[in-house]
Image (tube, grey):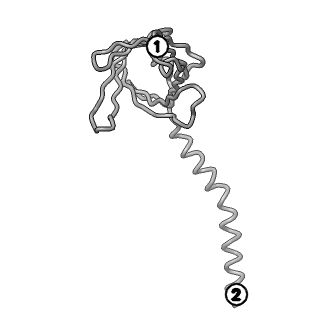
Amino acid sequence: MALLKYSRIDISLRMNNLRAPLFLLLLLLTSCFNSERNCKEFQVGAFEFQSISEKGDTLKTKFNRTKELEIGYFNNNIDSNSVKWVSECECIYKKINPKSLNERKPVQMKILSTFEDTYVFEYSFVGDIKNTQRGLAKKISE
């Protein structure tokens, strides 16, 4: 029994000595998979965004964005927003001609990751982090 006890202690000590190198190896491997964020490429251009309605229909929105203006096209409606970039990857939208109190609320958008011609983003009304939603937009032209 005493021999078995020492063997367990010996194995435990050896495992403790391996924990730090294993942790560093895992940290190194996971850091290689960080999301790329090339946000400047997505600040201006023509984009397409798809979402699923509550009924299960695919809804497609197209929009053109300059550094200061975004014009969106959805269901034969045109919508215009002013754009203020607060950082390279985050901006605030304000509807130019709001028709309701809800439309007066500014929307915050943050690009989370980019890949080739698409970016993943999250958005919410400014200050309403409980209702943050995510989306995927595709750049269709400059």
Measured along the vertical axis of the image, is residue 24 above or below residue 59?
A: below
Foreground residue among 72 and 28: 72
**Residue at which label 2 appears:** 3
- Spatial separation of the CA atoms under disc 2 and disc 1: 80 Å
Mark 1: which amino acid?
Pro
Measured along the vertical axis of the image, is residue 35 above or below residue 42?
A: below
**Residue at which label 1 appears:** 98
Chain-order first, disc 2 or disc 1: 2
| 10 Å crowding of disc 1: few (<14), some (14-19), many (20+) | some
| 10 Å crowding of disc 2: few (<14), some (14-19), many (20+) | few
Quadrant containing the N terminus in the rendered view = bottom right
> Which labelled disc corresponds to residue 70?
none
The picture quadrant where one finds residue 57 is top left
Foreground residue among 11 and 54: 54
Nearest-to-viewer mark from 2 and 1: 1
Name the residue: 49% across, 22% down: 102
Return the x and y of residue 124 as percentages of the image width and height.
51, 29
Name the residue: 48% across, 14% down: 95
Return the x and y of residue 98 as percentages of the image width and height.
46, 13
Name the residue: 60% across, 28% down: 127
Foreground residue among 86 and 131: 131
Q: Secondary structure at mark 2?
A: helix
Classify residue 71 as left or right of residue 109: left
Quadrant containing the C terminus in the rendered view = top left
Q: Secondary structure at mark 1?
A: loop
Return the x and y of residue 123 as percentages of the image width and height.
50, 28
Mark 2: which amino acid?
Leu
